[in-house]
């Protein structure tokens, strides 16, 4: 975390692995090795770089969009981890659909794993309790002292600070990506939809909109200007 802007940060914990991807996936292997060397140099050889099989795996990775909730990290409870698990399950269903969509996609998203598996991979050796997702969140030193950013309203009430990156970045560049890829392979994501609808209301954005059949589509006015959804670049088919 930033202690003095432009001068000093506090590194709470170091992930043992950084995941990278290139597009196209079969780009020169030498470049891939170079990216890995650069990452390892910056982190003083304390973290290894791992190349994912496809760029879409990065978009479907668990990441911040799957774990940043208003009740953050040390404040997690069973309800919070249940929500995270539901997003993880829908995300994994999308990856499974991609893998089975066509022979050419077989194995391309094998790097996409559940949120619990990611937490064990990144923080298993750091956390005191790895028996559950809740245990990792509560005992991982990298999460210690981190809480949801809040802002105070004129009436004195405290609410989540929706201008914080946990909301203004994780929604359009995270959850929306999960939903956009799900649409390409015809996978329903009711819980991800619920979160996006809640968040877009607080962020003043229009992303998910119901179509004539009552299904949610990414056709809102902010999709093409404020997200990285494939649909915003004219990609409307997995092919």
Image (spheres, helix red, strand yellow):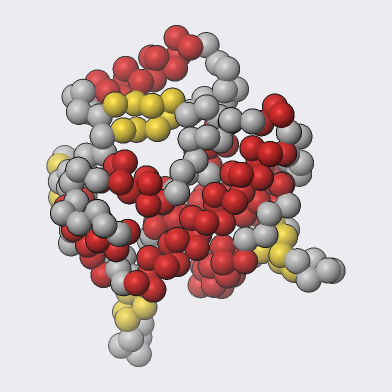
Residue 97 picture quarter? top right
The residue depicted at 45 percent of the width and 61 percent of the height is: 85
Indicate whether 187 appears above or below 118.
below
Left or right relative to 190: residue 120: left
Left or right relative to 129: residue 149: right
- Residue 209 appears at what percent x and percent y? 71, 66
Residue 146, visible in the rendered structure: no
The residue depicted at 71 percent of the width and 29 percent of the height is: 103
State which quarter of the image contains the C terminus: top right
- Residue 11 appears at what percent x and percent y? 17, 43
Q: Residue furthest bottom?
A: 155
Task: Tell which of 40 and 167 is nearer to you.
Answer: 40
Residue 67, visible in the rendered structure: yes
The residue depicted at 52 percent of the width and 11 percent of the height is: 28
- Residue 153 appears at what percent x and percent y? 36, 82
Task: Tell which of 3 and 183 is nearer to you.
Answer: 183
Give the mark count: 0
Left or right relative to 239: residue 196: left
- Residue 30 appears at what percent x and percent y? 45, 9
Left or right relative to 220: residue 5: left
Indicate whether 97 appears above or below 86.
above
Q: Residue furthest right?
A: 212
The residue depicted at 47 percent of the width and 29 percent of the height is: 52
């Amino acid at each position: 975390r930033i202690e003095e802007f432009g001068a000093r940060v506090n590194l709470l914990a170091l992930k043992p692995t950084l995941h990278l991807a290139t597009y196209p996936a079969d780009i020169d292997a030498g470049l891939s090795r170079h990216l890995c060397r650069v990452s390892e140099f910056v982190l003083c050889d304390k973290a290894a770089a791992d190349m994912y099989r496809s760029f879409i795996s990065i978009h479907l990775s668990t990441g911040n969009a799957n774990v940043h909730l208003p009740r953050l990290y040390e404040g997690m409870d069973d309800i919070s981890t249940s929500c995270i698990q539901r997003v993880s399950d829908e995300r994994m269903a999308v990856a499974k659909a991609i893998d089975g969509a066509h022979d050419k996609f077989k194995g391309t998203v094998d790097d996409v794993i559940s949120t619990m598996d990611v937490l064990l991979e990144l923080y298993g050796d750091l956390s005191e309790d790895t028996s559950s997702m809740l245990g990792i969140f509560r005992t991982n030193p990298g999460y210690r002292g981190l809480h949801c950013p809040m802002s105070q309203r004129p009436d004195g009430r405290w609410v989540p600070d929706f201008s914080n990156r946990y909301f203004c970045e994780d929604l359009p560049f995270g959850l929306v990506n999960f939903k956009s890829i799900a649409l390409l392979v015809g996978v329903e994501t009711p819980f991800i939809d619920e979160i996006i609808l809640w968040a877009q209301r607080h962020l003043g954005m229009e992303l998910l909109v119901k179509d004539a059949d009552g299904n949610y589509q990414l056709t809102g006015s902010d999709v093409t200007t404020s997200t990285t959804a494939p649909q915003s670049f004219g990609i409307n088919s997995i092919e």
